[in-house]
Every structure is written in C-alpha cells, then in structure tokens.
Amino acid sequence: MRRLSIFLYIVIVSVFAGCSSGDVWEGLVYPDRGNLLIHLSSGQFKNLEKCEAASLEMLRSKNALKKGYYECGKNCKSGLASFNGDCEETVRGNYYK
C-alpha cells in the first residue's frame, strides 16, 4: 500500500511539473500597422515557430500580409496585448515587408 501511495505521489507531481514548465508564446496580429489600436490575438503556443505560423496565417486570411504585421511575445506576465513590455522576448514579423 505504501509503495502505491509513493508511486501515485510521484505521478501526480510529475504531471503538474510537466504542465507548468516550458515557455508560452502569445501572438498578436495587427491587420493595419498604421493603426495599432486594432489587434487580434492569434493564440498561445509552445514555441515561436507555431506563433509565427498562426499569426501569418491570420494575416493571410484577412488579406493583410502587405499592410499588417504581427508580434509574438515569450512568457508575458500581463499578456502581450497589455503593451506593458513585460515579456521576456518579443519578436516582430512582417513589419518591414
């Protein structure tokens, strides 16, 4: 019985540790880079590549590849849309195209 309890404890701790570890990338899409007040969330992702791909697809779906751009922020405390600059890293894409 004691072994089972220890095993269950290890499994539960491992599950929670696995869920809380890793980086989170949050994407924002600006359909018109001239108006930063209008932005849409492209979601949260486990890596930068997925954030960029989803953000570009959203721009493509809005026919805004030429006039819009996106940002992906890593581990943002208040959320990327809060404009607090509290992300560990921010990557801007499609900005100069």
Image (tube, rainbow, N blue to C red):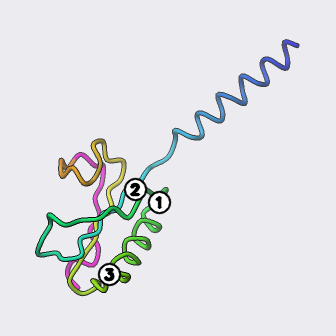
The Cα atoms of the two marked residues, 1 and 2, are separated by 6 Å
Q: Residue at x 72, y 30 (%)?
A: 11
Task: Indicate yes or no whether the magenta region holds residue 79.
Answer: no
Most extreme residue toward the left is 34
The correct choice, above or below, for 4 with respect to 49 in the image is above
The Cα atoms of the two marked residues, 2 and 3, are separated by 22 Å
Between 66 and 3, the one lying in front of the other is 66
Instruction: Please name the residue that numbered disc 3 is placed on.
Output: 62
Q: Residue at x 24, y 76 (%)?
A: 31
Instruction: Please name the residue that numbered disc 2 is placed on.
Output: 25
Tag 2: amino acid: Trp
Work out whether mark 1 precedes mark 2 in sequence or the reverse, and give the earlier one. Answer: 2
Question: Are there few (<14), some (14-19), or many (20+) residues within 10 Å of tag 3?
Answer: few
Tag 1: amino acid: Asn
Looking at the image, do the residues carrying marks 1 and 2 touch, with CB atoms under 8 Å apart?
yes
Between 27 and 96, the one lying in front of the other is 27
State the SS at label 3. loop
Residue 47: mark in rendering:
1
